[in-house]
């Protein structure tokens, strides 16, 4: 790696990723358009996407076992062959129940393929090149999805030709990874799940990941049907999807740079507020043509950056040895959100109308915004009480007493009514007990850093120095 460009070193894996995502990106849009042309209920379209993400969730456990038993390359080859066969099954039958089963199997196979690629890149990439390699991996993924939309635009009547090409791409993605000369990576080790612990430690991040999953699942599964309901032809639908995905691709790098300079919790609140307004306007206004393309481009910028920002925000608030478990929890949380989102959105679309897709997304974004505001308010209350403790003329003790509002009662300068109110406020007590355990909210401070742990440690050190 040190003497060779990372792009050339992992060229086989990148080419495999490109072919795999061309197939996956076009298959989801194809199924949505095909069912929309047949006037199938929106609930079925949403169920297809939910089953795919359910397969991803189930595949996260199965994939570890398969890769551990037979190795990365064999696991990838077997998964790709199964996914290719499932894609061709749509040619043989129109039975929707069978299609649902195929989507679950495709999701499980795709998760195994993702795990092979990402664990391979993780293990054999040098630390000095890790950011470059994974940035190129994400770019390749987005380009593959856009390529899948462009391929589908060449078949306005749909038919079986796109499915044949999709199956070919799934099959051909085996070739580069099977012929690679790179060293075979070590088997995966299952990552423990600590869902409840992480929900207490990084509630904002996991809430944003859940909402991002609901939005992504709903959009990929139901946006083709929404666009078709507005009278768009197949070429226009694929352009609509491509513009949204392209926006997500272009926004990754600048939004990442911005999140390194501005507290990520504030960016999440801004994205949630902007998405609430934007999607509500799309749902209410009769947008068409350029106006609709511009609106969906802005949607892609805001919606497709929620997940990476929330993931980075969560990782900055946990210890290094907890990050593997956190990654597994984030993937599971995203998958569960993507399972339920399409089902709820498709039900609303079925009974009210296609515009309810964006009304549902607007409700999700607004709920996220309210949740973030609530956590922000609670965090500021906690900081105010910490300030009162740190301003005391004596050195505070340690132990359980410090984690309770009762500690403030020992300070005669604190208002007694305020102390009693806080002692009976269950939400406040629960929040206080998490300090300084990494509660993920930015605090107004002189240093532009949204890590609450850093703030508490620095305040404690300054207090100790003054007492000494």
Image (tube, helix red, strand yellow):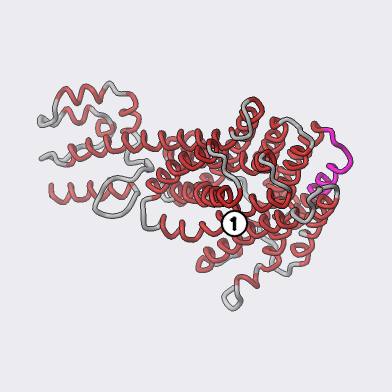
Quarter placement of the N terminus: bottom right
Query: Is residue 94 part of the magenta span, yes or no?
Result: yes
Numbered range of the magenta stretch? 83-95
Q: Is residue 246 above or below residue 457?
A: below
The residue positioned 76% from the left and 32% from the top of the image is: 40
Q: Taking 101 as reference, is 309 left or right?
A: left
Q: Taking 78 as reference, is 212 left or right?
A: left
The residue positioned 34% from the left and 49% from the top of the image is: 450
Residue 271 in view in this figure: yes
Q: Is residue 45 above or below residue 138?
A: above
Residue 389 at x, y = what percent?
18, 37
Q: Nearer the viewer, residue 294 or 380?
A: 294
Residue 61 in view in this figure: no
Residue 354 at x, y = what percent?
63, 34
Q: Is residue 6 above or below residue 408?
A: below
Query: Is residue 146 part of the magenta span, yes or no?
Result: no
Residue at the farthest bottom position: 3
Q: Taking 458 as reference, is 76 left or right?
A: right
Helix, strand or loop: magenta stretch: helix
The residue positioned 42% from the left and 37% from the top of the image is: 369
How packed mark 1 is, by other alpha carbons closer than 10 Å (few <14, some 14-19, many 20 or more), is some
Residue on which the image places disc 1 = 246
Residue 273 at x, y = what percent?
42, 41
């Amino acid at each position: 790696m040190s003497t060779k460009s990372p792009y050339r070193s992992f060229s086989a894996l990148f080419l495999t990723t490109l072919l795999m995502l061309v197939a996956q990106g076009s298959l989801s849009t194809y199924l949505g358009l095909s069912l929309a042309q047949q006037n199938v209920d929106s609930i079925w379209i949403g169920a297809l996407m939910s089953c795919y993400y359910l397969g991803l969730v189930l595949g996260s456990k199965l994939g570890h076992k398969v890769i551990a038993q037979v190795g990365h390359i064999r696991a990838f080859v077997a998964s790709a062959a199964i996914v290719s066969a499932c894609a061709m099954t749509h040619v043989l039958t129109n039975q929707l129940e069978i299609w649902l089963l195929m989507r679950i199997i495709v999701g499980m196979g795709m998760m195994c393929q993702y795990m092979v690629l990402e664990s391979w890149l993780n293990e054999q990439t040098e630390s000095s090149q890790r950011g470059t390699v994974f940035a190129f991996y994400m770019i390749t993924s987005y380009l593959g999805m856009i390529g899948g939309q462009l391929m589908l635009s060449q078949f306005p009547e749909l038919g079986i030709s796109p499915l044949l090409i999709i199956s070919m791409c799934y099959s051909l993605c085996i070739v580069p990874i099977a012929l690679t000369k790179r060293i075979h990576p070590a088997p995966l080790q299952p990552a423990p799940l600590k869902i409840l612990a992480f929900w207490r430690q990084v509630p904002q991040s996991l809430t944003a990941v859940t909402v991002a999953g609901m939005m992504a699942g709903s959009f990929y599964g139901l946006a083709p049907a929404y666009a078709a309901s507005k009278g768009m032809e197949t070429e226009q639908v694929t352009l609509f999807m491509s513009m949204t995905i392209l926006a997500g691709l272009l926004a990754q790098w600048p939004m990442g740079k911005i999140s390194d300079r501005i507290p990520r919790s504030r960016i999440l609140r801004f994205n949630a507020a902007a998405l609430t307004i934007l999607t509500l306007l799309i749902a209410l206004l009769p947008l068409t043509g350029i106006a609709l393309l511009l609106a969906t481009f802005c949607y892609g910028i805001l919606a497709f950056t929620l997940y990476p920002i929330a993931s980075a925000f969560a990782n900055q608030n946990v210890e290094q040895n907890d990050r593997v478990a956190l990654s597994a929890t984030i993937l599971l949380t995203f998958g569960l959100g993507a399972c339920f989102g399409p089902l709820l959105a498709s039900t609303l679309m079925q009974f009210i109308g296609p515009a309810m897709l964006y009304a549902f997304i607007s409700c999700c974004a607004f709920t996220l915004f309210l949740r973030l505001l609530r956590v922000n308010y609670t965090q500021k209350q906690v900081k105010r009480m910490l300030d009162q403790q740190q301003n005391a003329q004596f050195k505070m003790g340690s132990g359980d007493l410090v984690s309770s509002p009762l500690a403030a009662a020992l300070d005669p300068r604190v208002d007694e009514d305020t102390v009693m109110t806080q002692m009976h406020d269950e939400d406040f007590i629960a929040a206080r007990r998490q300090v300084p355990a990494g509660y993920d909210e930015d605090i107004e401070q002189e240093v532009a850093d949204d890590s609450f742990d850093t703030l508490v440690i620095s305040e404690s050190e300054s207090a100790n120095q003054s007492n000494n």
